[in-house]
Each structure stands twice: as C-alpha cells, then as structure tokens.
Image (tube, rainbow, N blue to C red):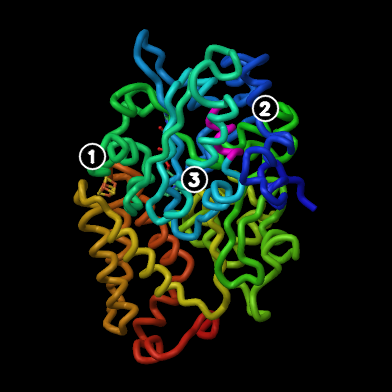
C-alpha cells in the first residue's frame, strides 16, 4: 500500500469538521509554524521539500515564494487557485469537499510564511456546493482562533475570503484569475511582471493551487527531508491523480511519486485495469492540455525504461515521445476510442474557452476545430492533416497565455502518434462515421 500524506485521514467520519480534524492532528503544523518556526523557517522547509506546484506547471513552490517582492508598506496577498477546470482534473474538488481544513491550515501557514494578511480562494463556479463547505470551515477556524487578529497570540493576522468564478476556464490562468478577482473580465495579462511582483491590485501576490497549499501541512509536520523520501528525483512527495476514462476504478488517488504508470493503471490499489478486458490504446496523463501518448510510449520511455508517474519520466523524450504529469488528470482510452473524435472534443473546448485577446489563439482554435470537424464528418482531405499541423505550429509559443499552447499540443500529439488514424478517417469516411473503431484498422 502506498503511503499517504494528504488523504490519509480522508476516510475518517466527520473529518470535514473542525473538532474531528483537530482531534486527528489538525492544526498541529500551524501551531508549529506560527509558534516555533517563523516565516523564514517555513520557507526553508518548503524549499527543502522540493514541493512543485500541483496545478500543472510544476514550478518549485519555495522558489516562487522567495520571488515575492517586499516593498515597504505594500500589502502582499496569497491566492488559492481553486478554479480547477482542466478536462480530466477533479482532485482539488475532492480535497476541498472532504478535508477543507487541510486547505485552510495550508493557507494559514503559507500566508504566515509570505507575510500576507489576506488570502483568497478563487473557486470555479461549477463547484457550486463547495464554497459553503469552505465558508463553514473558515468560520470554524476563526471561531477557534486560527484566523482573524493576533492568531494564537503570535501577532499574526489573517482573513480568508472565498470568491466564486463564473464558469470560464481561462480564469484558472493566474493573471486572468487576478483580473476576475478584481472584478474585471478574466483576460490574461502579459508576463512579466509576474504576480509575485505585481499581482492582485498590482501588489505582490503568490498564486498557488489547492493541492500545493494542502501539501505544506504535511511538509511542516514531517519536515522537508522526510517529504522528499515519498518521491524520487525532482518529483518529491505524493501527488493526487484524478483517474478517468476506460478503467475499472475511476477516482482520486494519492500516489507516492515513485510508482510506474503500468502499476497505476493495472494494480487493484489504483485504476484496476482496463474496463471490460479491453486493450489499452492511449492515455492523456496530465489533463487535456498535455500530449496524448500511445500505449507503447505510455508504459515505456523511448529508451525502453519503465515510464514512471513523475514529472521527469512522463516528460522523457520531450513531446516527440513523452508528455507531462501536468495537473494529474489521467484520461485512459481503450481500443474502441477514436483519437480524431477525442481531438475534436478538446479542440471544441479550447475554441470555446479562448478569451479572444490574441489572434493565433482566437482564430487558430476555431480553424482547428473546423478542420477536425470536417475530418470527423467524412468531409476531410489528405491535405487537411498538414494544414492542422501547420495551424497548431503557428499557435504554439505565439500567444499571451498558455491556453494557446494547450490547444496546440493535443492536436500535434494526435497527428504525431496517430496520423494513420486521421488518414483512415479520410479514406474510409463512410465507415468512420458509422462505426466505433480503435485499433481495428491497424
Ligand atoms: P508557468 O510555467 O507560466 O508559471 C508557473 C508559476 O511560476 C506561475 O505562478 C508563475 O507566476 C511563476 N513564475 C514563473 N517564472 C517566474 C519568475 N521568473 N518570477 C516569478 N514567478 C515566476 O505556468 P502557469 O501558467 O502557471 O500554468 C500552466 C499550467 O497549468 C499548464 O501546464 C497546465 O498543465 C496547467 N493547467 C491546469 C489547470 C487546472 O485546472 N488545474 C487548468 C489549465 C491549465
Ligand atoms: Fe486569450 Fe488564448 Fe491569448 Fe490566452 S492565448 S490570452 S486564452 S486568446
């Protein structure tokens, strides 16, 4: 059994409420941090842990915190990105719904380390029932003296506010989120300046994902050196994976980052194998923005080594033969799934969610969708495949925010690994329209 640091107490009845959380060791890390470690001590421990941002980019958290500007008399803010909208990703929802105090405690410790007296949780609008859970946890924590003025007599003040989004995927991009939090349309800003220098209300701001902030709690409890032992290389600690698609046991799993992809898919502890005894065809291992991998490259790297559930191993080979751990949205496809149809589904999504600020993204996502629709609907031409390739290349790297890249990469990977499937669609248009197919045409 893999060891757990975040979900180890998730099964305890009533853990959502303060008394149960506290009587099971909750707020011990906050007490330790505030009373005996000091802000610098917390920062050092987080740096030592090697914790990387769990929202998708995997940026080192301690480094991000150390970038925060500290001009005299200017407030600093901590923003929790709970706008979890990446297709295939639903791990933060689980944390907030079942162990909200873990997030509140993580926010408290992190705000203390950053010297922030106001923290915001920006939560996606579709998680309509969760803000009430968070508000209740905040009220309980405040009632017990963990929020408000002079917390535990340390002189540190903190208020946490919950802000609901209105259902736009782009508001998960940190600068769009900040714009939205300020009451404006959620258009991404050009970086630099990074939020650490000019963020909310143009003040120094750190934006961290829900799971990242929750992970600070066990790091303070067990120490950075111990945390490292739960992973391998630059993938330290545990990671939440939301597994979905054609598997026997979809759900949210906490893994130590030292297991193989094969073990994650086939062991009964996790996904329990492919549904209905079918064959594995492909997988998107880190949410819809990362490249799809065919089964052979998913289980083994191009060097023939076992592919591991780590940042490094999943990216091994770059995009030619690798992908990314991303947000941990693990989408498994069996032999009956159609790559063209899947690619179209994602292209439609990115086109719909593009904010429209930059032409390559605004026009390119719509163009890719139309070309894919033609291929899927039996009206495609062979030249459309090269056209698609050309469009995605012109989007990648030419936009303000990563949504452009996120729209381009899945198309590129689908063509790179499954070009013959696109060709088959074009040469067998009638058949492609009327039957399900996967590996059969190979
Ligand atoms: P990024 O790599 O641009 O930035 C990572 C973080 O490091 C940001 O907070 C940024 O401000 C900070 N940073 C980087 N360089 C810095 C510097 N020199 N000074 C100060 N701060 C610096 O990536 P981003 O835009 O934060 O995230 C993109 C990822 O988000 C994608 O790879 C995708 O996997 C993921 N994503 C996740 C979603 C979800 O629902 N969880 C939704 C959409 C995308
Ligand atoms: Fe908007 Fe797309 Fe440009 Fe991002 S890449 S700023 S979503 S148009």
Write down the region rendered in magenta.
101-108
The secondary element bearing badge 2 is classed as helix
Q: Nearer the viewer, residue 74 or 393?
A: 74
**How far from the left and from the top, in percent, is residue 425?**
38, 81
Residue 66 lies, with reference to residue 180, above or below; the image says: above
User: Is 103 colored magenta in this rendering?
Assistant: yes
The secondary element bearing badge 3 is classed as loop
Q: Nearer the viewer, residue 439 or 126?
A: 126
Q: Main secondary structure of the magenta part?
A: helix
Q: Residue at x 37, y 8 (%)?
A: 72
Q: State the residue position of label 2.
A: 29
Q: Residue at x 58, y 13 (%)?
A: 154
Farthest front residue? 143
Q: Is residue 237 left or right of residue 78?
A: right
Q: Is residue 383 left or right of residue 227?
A: left
How far apart, in angstroms, are the residues tagged by discs 1 and 2? 36 Å
Q: Which mark is residue 184?
A: 1
Q: Residues within 10 Å of mark 3 (few under 14, many from 20)?
A: many
Q: Residue at x 41, y 82 (%)?
A: 424
């Amino acid at each position: 059994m893999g060891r757990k640091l975040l979900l180890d107490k998730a099964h305890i009845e009533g853990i959502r409420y303060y008394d149960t959380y506290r009587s099971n060791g909750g707020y011990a890390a906050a007490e330790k941090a505030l009373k005996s470690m000091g802000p610098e001590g917390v920062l050092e421990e987080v740096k030592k842990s090697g914790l990387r941002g769990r929202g998708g980019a995997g940026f080192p958290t301690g480094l991000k915190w150390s970038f925060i500007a500290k001009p005299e008399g200017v407030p600093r803010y901590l923003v929790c990105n709970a706008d979890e909208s990446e297709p295939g990703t639903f791990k933060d929802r689980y944390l907030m719904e079942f162990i909200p105090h873990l997030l509140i405690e993580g926010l408290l410790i992190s705000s203390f380390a950053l010297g922030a007296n106001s923290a915001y949780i920006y939560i996606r609008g579709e998680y309509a029932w969760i803000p009430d859970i968070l508000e209740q946890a905040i009220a309980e924590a405040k009632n017990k003296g963990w929020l408000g003025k002079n917390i535990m007599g340390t002189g540190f003040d903190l208020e946490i506010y919950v802000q609901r989004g209105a259902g736009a995927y782009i508001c998960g991009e940190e600068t769009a989120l900040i714009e939205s939090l300020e009451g404006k349309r959620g258009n991404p800003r050009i970086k630099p300046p990074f939020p650490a220098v000019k963020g909310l209300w143009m003040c120094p701001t750190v934006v961290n994902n829900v799971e990242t902030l929750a992970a600070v709690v066990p790091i303070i409890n067990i120490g950075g050196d111990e945390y490292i032992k739960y992973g391998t290389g630059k993938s330290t600690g545990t990671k939440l994976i939301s597994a979905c698609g054609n598997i026997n046991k979809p759900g949210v799993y906490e893994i130590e980052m030292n297991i193989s992809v094969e073990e994650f898919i086939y062991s009964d502890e996790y996904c329990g194998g492919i549904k209905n005894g079918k064959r594995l065809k492909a997988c998107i291992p880190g949410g819809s923005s990362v490249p799809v991998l065919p089964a052979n490259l998913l289980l083994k790297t191009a060097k023939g080594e076992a592919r591991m559930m780590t940042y490094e191993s999943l990216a091994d080979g770059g995009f030619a033969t690798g992908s990314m751990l991303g947000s941990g949205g693990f989408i498994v496809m069996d032999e009956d799934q159609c790559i063209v149809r899947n690619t179209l589904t994602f292209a439609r999504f990115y086109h719909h969610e593009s904010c429209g600020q930059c032409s390559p993204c605004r026009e390119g996502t719509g163009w890719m969708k139309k070309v894919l629709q033609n291929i899927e609907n039996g009206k495609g031409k062979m030249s459309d495949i090269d056209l698609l390739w050309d469009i995605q290349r012109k989007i990648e790297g030419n936009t303000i925010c990563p949504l452009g890249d996120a729209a381009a990469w899945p198309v590129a990977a689908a063509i790179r690994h499954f070009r013959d499937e696109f060709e088959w669609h074009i040469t067998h248009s009638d058949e492609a329209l009327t039957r399900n197919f996967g590996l059969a045409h190979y």
